[in-house]
Amino acid sequence: MAPWPAKANSVSTPLIRLENVSKNYRQHQAVIDLSLTVPAGEIYGFLGPNGAGKTTTIRILAGALAPSAGRVFLAGYDLAKQPREAKTILGYIPDRPFLYEKLSGWEFLLFTAGLYRTPTKIARQRSEELLNLFDLWDWRDELIENYSHGMKQRLIMSGALLPKPRILVVDEPMVGLDPRGAKLVMEIFRRLAREEGVAMFVSTHTMSLASRLCDRIGIINKGRLTAEGTEEALRAQVGRQGDLEELFLEMTNEGEA
Amino acid sequence: MREFFWLLKPSILTLRNYLKDPGPGGRVKIASLTAFALVMWVALFLLSLRMIRSFYSVEGFGDILAYKTFNLLWLTGSAFLIFSAVITALSSFYLAKDLGLLMAAPVSRESVFWARSVQSFLASAWMPAAFVFPVFLAYGWHFGANPLYYFLTPLAALGVALSSAFVSQAAVILLVNILPARRTKDIMSLLGLLSFVALYLAFRLLRPERLVNPDNLQSVASYLASLQTPTSPMLPTAWATELLWPLLGGSAEEFRWIYLLLLGLGAAVLGLLTSYGADLLYWVGYNKSQEGASRQRAGGLLSLVASGFRLVRDPEARALMVKDFKIFFRDHTQWSQLFLLGALMIIYLYNFSVLNLKRYPLQAFFLENTIAFLNVGLVGLVSATLALRFAFPSISAEGFSYWIIRSAPLSTPAFMRHKLIFWLTPIMAVALFLTYLTNRFLNAAPFMSATAFVLTFILTPGLCSLAVGLGARFPRFETENLAQVPTGYGGLIFMVSSSLSLLALIGLSAWPVVAYLQIQRGRAVWGLKESLLIPLLTALVLVLTWQLWRRPFKIGEASLAIYDEDAKGPEKGLEPELEDDFLLKAPRKTKGRPSLD
């Protein structure tokens, strides 16, 4: 695969920066005063119980939802003031694979390339690479309505990687994937972070995945970031040993339930 | 039985919750839709009353005409219900998303079937019932019907509706065992649409205006004589007619209970047969429906035609246009509406081709040019209809995939602009084509032809912009059938706004056009009044069309930029101002809250 165009050299450069982000739905506060950074080349795991504010945060990061307060910077671009620049370097993989069902996989990738203003020749070349990588080449001319859930999820990943993003925002990456697909995706994510310096923000409920994949973990509960750090740092914070699942339950007070 | 009622509960609770909390602007929506329905009912009642009176005034045939129309009303209502019940039954029995959950639950399949049968019946019957109600009322009013008529009409309607719905449901159970459910739905929707188009064309091409021409009286008399043949006595619609017709005379003497009994028995027998069919075939058909339809592949002629979009230089615009073009022609609910467009154009042009203004030689010039001028409004109405059918739902057409647009480096105005250009191009072509041909049919003066062209040219973008803007202001991303989007609240707002705009445009431009024509014909001279009013009114027309082009687009843009898919509307907490003053103000963005554009 051809190298990413704007590979970040320094892991200390924060590609994702959230400053005091809050989101209110009428009386309900989904996200409260959230601040965090993710440097280039890091995979940041974002964990929390149901309704904690994970998906809201992800959608704010992806530009699909405006925050009620606070600011989001992607590679230094203010998402509110420079949305086009910020979104050009962002890839977003939602948890639900809603796609244009009446397009084929190949057509969908060319459409995505058009939105990112990728030249046609490069778009075709990248689409071929990605469809092969995600094992969808033989299905390229089938309409998406004929794809399985896992195939749609892999196609969304192909679309997100097509413009070679410097930031990848992923909501529940393994939903609908079979073990082979899950392994493939994990390898790709690791390679993107280590070799291409992509900053990744991954929300998941799967503790084993977070433990194996993520460099740093943030735990959100009732809209607030309650803990952040490496798995070791979280253990030190809780003051006990155990795997990530036990730490998570302890920190979100669900262990007693 | 308890199970059956329990299965109806989600629908009842959904309705109750909606009425309790209809969401932002929901009460305004309910109130305006109710007001609109009442106006429509009153209009339909008055129209029906006028029609019945005119039928009754035809000497010798009045009675038979009124009777035949009464019977035809039952037949049409029943036929309409049969078609719509097929579509709703297919969705309720086989395609609804919650069926998997219900089939896995410890409830009997009979309960599931009957709960769905009731839902399907209500979904298909409410619209024909709403339409025929004022017509039956008009019959009763005109003839001074016996009070029993008003009591028995709803009962007879229920009998006919139940029989029609059972026929549809039985047909669906059978069809799904032969064809895949999704394919059956496609075919039936298409057939329904084609029947409507055929009926519409047939009615117009029969030229009913000939009935008022004395030259054709002989053929009319023979036509009326043919009407005296009786209708099939085996149909529930005939029983309903026979039950109610004697009561219209005011006396209950000739009234026969037997027809009420027949209606009840007919519905019961059809219900039993449907139940028997369901026992045998519903579960088998349900399993077949889960196996999926035949697979459609990309490529072919459509891709070849779409390659013409290579001429569009901007890659972003090209990507959106190719996508919209391909999806439009692969989705039968979208492309099949082209039949409606075709029928509309044929009838439109036909009306002008049979208009014989030479019969009035002294007023020919005046008539030709007046009609050519008013034709701008009619072409505007055609453009508004096209914009409502195609441009208005184009935002909602993104469906649940709208997240792709929102997370892409594409601004909301740019996205809407591409939608506008995509639909404005063909609608403008149709509008100019109609203007050109009708002006030729009318033999309009060069000045009038040029005026009609200019007015159409500046009006059509405004109407398309209004459609795209309101489509963005009232999007329905969750809809499964795009053809239903124009029938919602936003569609109603569009119809009212576009009609008012057309009236204003015609009203403002009428005086300058007439004044100029008079001067040209030497019937008036250019004075101070003309020097002041002609430029002023022309400027007002330009301002109006410019506002129509800009304002709704801006309102839609501001609303869509803060749309929250979970709230199915603008994000809560960022709601636009009240919906009833949407034309006056753009949605407010609270200070400090970022816009994504």
Image (cartoon, rainbow, N blue to C red):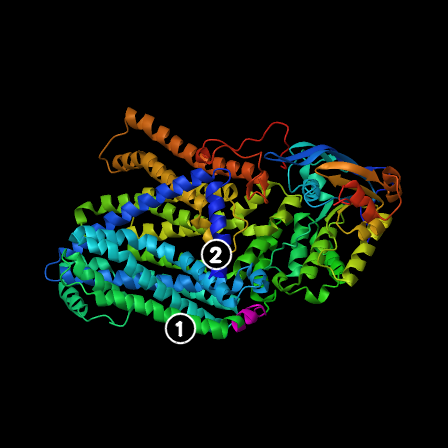
Instruction: Tell which subunit mark 1 falls on.
Output: B
Image: magenta residue range:
B284-294
The vertical placement of A10 against B67, above or below, is: above
Closer to the camera, B203 or B224?
B224
* Mark 1 or mark 2, earlier in chain: 2
Count of numbered badges drawn on the protein: 2
Disc sitting over residue B8 in the figure: 2
Can see residue B451? no
| Amino acid type shown at disc 1 | Leu
Closer to the camera, B91 or B565?
B91
Identify residue for label 1: B273
Disc 1 and disc 2 in contact, CB within 8 angstroms: no
State the residue at coordinates (70%, 37%).
A223
In the picture provided, is B118 more to the left or to the right than B596?
A: left
Q: Residue B318 location, x and y as percent? A: 61, 51
Q: Secondary structure at mark 2?
A: helix
Could you tell me which quadrant the C terminus of chain B lies in?
top right
